[in-house]
Image (cartoon, helix red, strand yellow):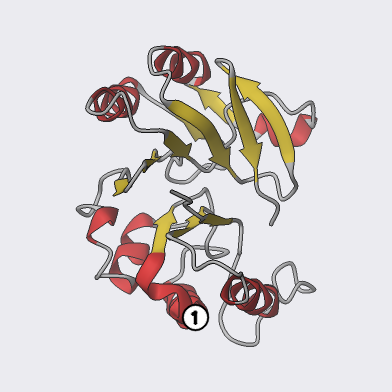
Amino acid sequence: MTRLVVQLSDTHVRRPGELAERRVDTAAALRRAVEAVQRLPLEPDAVIVSGDCVDSGAPSQYDHLRELLAPLADRLHLLPGNHDARDAMRDAFPELAELGPRGTPVQWTLDLPGLRLVAIDTSVDGVAHGELDEARLAALDATLAADRSTPTIVAMHHPPFTTLIERMDDYGLRVGRAGFAAVLARHPQVDRVVSGHLHRSIVSVVAGRPALTAPS
């Protein structure tokens, strides 16, 4: 059975009419991306936006994001990044119960026929780098252990590998990288890991599994 999962990342949406870094029309870019998804020959089973959905976590930015993503609403799944604010995201998308209760990491599982999507929250309030503490890793381990047979994709914002881009590695997953690899090693059903944060496409390997970043 063919399953199609679309990943968008680092959309950095601002208020209507505002440019990111005073020069990038991120809203126009996201509109083009949504239109491209709508033109796909197969309808996606899921569309993941893997963090930095907005540029500074402002509620008005999430309102704009919601408007831009409306054509994909029935298959949309969000993850926070270092530019996001979890509770503002929850307020803007109250129908996404998977975002969980206020004040907690956003970690969800989507079970499709023949495929699982498991999201883990690497963001830390107030800083650019990412972390996976023992509690988040334990939750991931338990989620993966609940189904060891279905092929699984793990989604996150900060990539769990070294890129050799010094500035981005400084802002990368500083805590929990080894622990994440150890969890993956215990769960061979994990087919790949997808992330964002780097604004470019990079392919690496973590615990013998492909690890890919989506461009902005």
The image quadrant of residue 38 is: bottom right
* Vertical side of 88 occupied by 161: above or below: above
Q: Which x, y percent locates residue 41?
A: 60, 70
The residue drawn where x is 36% and y is 42% is 114
User: Quick one: 202 or 4, which is closer to the camera?
Assistant: 4
User: Quick one: 25 or 155, which is closer to the camera?
Assistant: 155
Residue placed under numbered mark 1 in the picture: 64
User: Quick one: 202 or 65, which is closer to the camera?
Assistant: 202
Q: Is residue 60 visible?
A: no
Q: Which x, y percent locates residue 1?
A: 43, 48
- Asked whether, in this view, residue 123 is left or right of residue 24, the answer is left
- Asked whether, in this view, residue 4 is left or right of residue 203, the answer is left
The residue drawn where x is 57% and y is 42% is 195
Element under label 1?
helix
- Asked whether, in this view, residue 139 is left or right of residue 72, the answer is left
Q: Quadrant of the C terminus?
A: bottom right
The residue drawn where x is 28% and y is 64% is 96
- Neighbour class for label 1 at 10 Å: few (<14), some, many (≥20)? some
The residue drawn where x is 56% and y is 25% is 174
The image quadrant of residue 76 is: bottom left
Report the amino acid beneath label 1.
Answer: His
